[in-house]
Amino acid sequence: MQICTIPLDTAKVRLQLQKKAVAGDGVALPKYRGLLGTVGTIAREEGMSALWKGIVPGLHRQCLFGGLRIGMYEPVKAFYVGKDHVGDVPLSKKILAALTTGGLAITIANPTDLVKVRLQSEGKLPPGVPRRYSGSLNAYSTIVRQEGVGALWTGLGPNVARNAIINAAELASYDQVKQTILKIPGFKDNVLTHLLAGLGAGFFAVCIGSPVDVVKSRMMGDSTYKNTLDCFVKTLKNDVCELTPLCSHTAMLTNMRTHINICFAGPLAFYKGFIPNFGRLGSWNVIMFLTLEQVQFQIAKKFVQRIESS
């Protein structure tokens, strides 16, 4: 799944890191525009393979972060509700458990996220300019050698906030949406219910987690920010508006264009890359939860069969 969604993640990182790009007439024109425009620009300038930049540390991240956050969720949730609890788990306990597992998991996996963003953020370079890193392993060693071991945890604050929030939005909302759907007449605990709950989880995760995701990507991809607050304030104040052509030359205005101003300055700057982010997280959640439900069903089925045969 990571192999399929990494191009969307690369597009998301480029959009989130995008700052001013001044055209010849002094108007700020962004290099990357929207999901398809960003993917097209990367493929045209750097080749199709550039869309899979960061795939190796991305896989490292999924093994560590994905395994820990999902594997710890049920035990931590059971710990918070207590061994004597009977009935549905309260939403507050689900959120607390997901926040805990998401924060702990990404604290361990932060170096993999840092390297992934560093590799994805490097675009087309001028002739003769070497790349910072030749690959993922070289990136790990170069960062440690040049910046110190602690640099591998650059952006840890917003990354913990981002992944704790997204993990809570995904796992808790999936549990809650599924629980709500099953109360509707005609719905059963089947693939359709899992699919709808997975889409809901992905949407909630992107809506809630986008602001901290933008701050995390910028801190990891650009070392000029002093800290999380500095990155947040500069993103809020200094981002530019995207200008999209509304009409071409007309008889009245032969050498001019009219533009509609789609502003991504201010609070909306924290939702840059929303569409590729939802495309990645939405599809990821559907496949992850469908797979998880089927694995749990098969394990439970085999367990029951063993009890019946004994």
Image: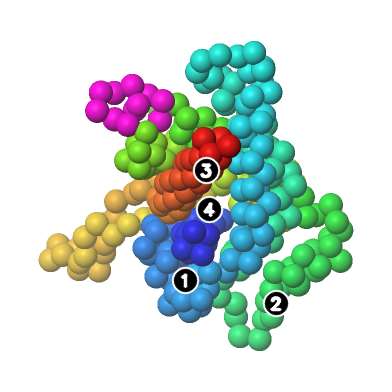
The residue to which callout 4 is attached is: 16
Three-letter code, disc 2 = Ser
Q: Residue at x 53, y 69 (%)?
A: 52
Query: Mark 4: which secondary structure?
Result: helix
Q: What residue range appears in magenta?
A: 178-188
**The C terminus sits in image quarter:** top right
The residue to which callout 2 is attached is: 134
Q: Nearer the viewer, mark 2 or mark 3?
A: 3
In this picture, residue 124 sits left or right of residue 198: right
Q: Are marks 1 and 4 in contact (CB under 8 Å)?
A: no
Task: Name which quarter of the figure residue 79 lies in.
Answer: top right
Q: Nearer the viewer, mark 3 or mark 1?
A: 3
User: Which color mode does the image show?
Assistant: rainbow
Where is residue 214? Give x, y as percent: 56, 47
Q: Residue at x 28, y 59 (%)?
A: 245
Label 1 vs 4, first from the N-terminus: 4
In this picture, residue 131 sits left or right of residue 138: left
Q: Residue at x 66, y 37 (%)?
A: 72
Could you classify mark 3 by the number of other residues whose Cα lies within 10 Å: few (under 14), some (14-19), or many (20 or more)? few
Height in image: 77 above or below 213?
A: above
The residue to which callout 3 is attached is: 302
Q: Nearer the viewer, residue 124 or 305?
A: 305
